[in-house]
Amino acid sequence: MKRGELLGSLEQIILLALMRLDGNAHGMIVRREIEKRTGRNISIGAVYATLERLETKGYVSSFTGEPTPERGGRAKRIFRVEAAGKRALQISEQTIRSMTAGLKDRLGTT
Amino acid sequence: MKRDSLPAFACSLLEFVLPGPYREAILGDLIEEYTLRSESTSRFAASRWFWSQACRSVPSMVWSSLRSRDCLISISTAMGVYIVMKILEHGAELAISKWVAPQPATYVLLAPVVFLTSSAIGGCVAARIRRGATKFLALMVMITVAVLIDLKVCTIPVPWWYQFGFLTLGPLAVIITPTLFGRLKQQRALA
C-alpha cells in the first residue's frame, strides 16, 4: 500500500462522519456528528482543512449550494464521499484490524 | 436574528484571515450555528462559542493554505505588485523632486500623497489578481517603511507622527481601498 493511501485519524473520522450522514453534508453538520459520537470539540477550521485535504486526494468531492439568509447570504459547501474515499476507509479499517489482532488482552478491550 | 447581533469583529477577522476557497462556507456555517445557539442558549454563550471557533479555526486553515502552496502564490503575487508599485512610486518622486517641487518642504507635503496613492493602487491591483495577496502586500509595505525609518533614510527633519503615518496608513490603504471599491461596486450593481 502506498504511503498516500493511509488516512490520518481526523481524516478517517471525517470520512466516517460523512458516510454516516449518507455521504452528503456540509462542514458544520460533520462537526456536530463528530462531537455527538466522540465528544471531541474540534474547530470548524480543522474540519474544512481536513476536507480540503481529502478533496485534493480525491476521496471526497464538493459543490456549492444556494446562499441562504440564515447564513448571512453565504453559500454552503456540500461534501460527498467518493469511491476512492470508501476504498481508503476499507484499507484503513483492514490495517487497524490486522494490527490490533491478538492484542485485545493487552489493550484491555473486549 | 439580525446580522448586527453577530460578533462583527470576529467575522471581519475571519473574512480577512481565512484563505479563499472555503472562506464563505466556514463563515456561513459559523453564522448559522451562532443563530441556532443564541436561540437555544444565550447570546453571550453563542458569542463565546463563535469566538472560540474563530480563534481555533484560523491556525488550521492558515497551515492548510501553506501546505497547499496557496500562500506561496499569494506571496509571489504580492511581491510582483510591490516591485511595480515601488518603480512607479520612485518615478513619481523623482518627477516631484526635480520638476514639480524642488524645495524639501513641498516634497515633505507631496511624498505622503504619492506613497498613499501608490499603496492604494497596489492594493487594488493585488486584490484584482488574487484577493489573498493584499495582506502580504500590506505586510511588505509595513516592513519596508519600518526598515527605512530605522535606517533613517529620510534626510529632511520630520516629526515622529509623520513617519508613524507612513507606517500605519500605507498598509491600511493597501487593505481598505480594494474593500471600499468592492462595496461601491456592489452598491452600484444593486442600484
Image (tube, coloured by chain):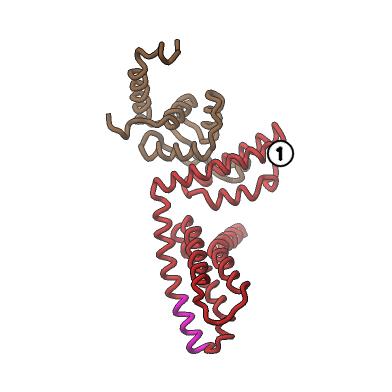
Residue B76, percent from left and from top: 39, 59
- Residue positioned most to the front: B151
Q: Give the camera-side residue of B178 and B105.
A: B105
Query: Looking at the image, is B167 positioned above or below residue A27?
Result: below
The chain letter of the red chain reads B
- For label 1, count other residues whose C-alpha is less than 10 Å away and answer few (under 14), some (14-19) or many (20+): some
Under tag 1, what secondary structure? helix
Q: Which amino acid does label 1 sit on?
A: Arg
- Residue positioned most to the left: A1
Which image quarter holds the C terminus of chain B? bottom right
Q: Give the camera-side residue of B16 and B145.
A: B145
Q: Residue at coordinates 51% horizontally, 31% vertically from top-left?
A: A30
Residue B91, percent from left and from top: 44, 79
Q: Can residue B124 be seen in this view?
A: no
**Boundaries of the magenta span:** B89-100
Residue A73, percent from left and from top: 59, 46
Query: Looking at the image, is A92 positioned above or below residue B53?
Result: above
The chain ID associated with circle 1 is B
Find residue B185 and report its image quarter: bottom right
Does the segment drawn in magenta span residue A8? no
**Is the stretch drawn in magenta largely helix, strand or loop?**
helix
Residue topped by disc 1: B43
Q: Residue at coordinates 44% horizontally, 37% vertically from top-left?
A: A50
Find residue A55 and report its image quarter: top left
Query: Looking at the image, is B169 positioned above or below residue B64?
Result: below
- Chain A in the picture: what colour? brown
Query: Looking at the image, is B96 positioned above or below residue B51?
Result: below
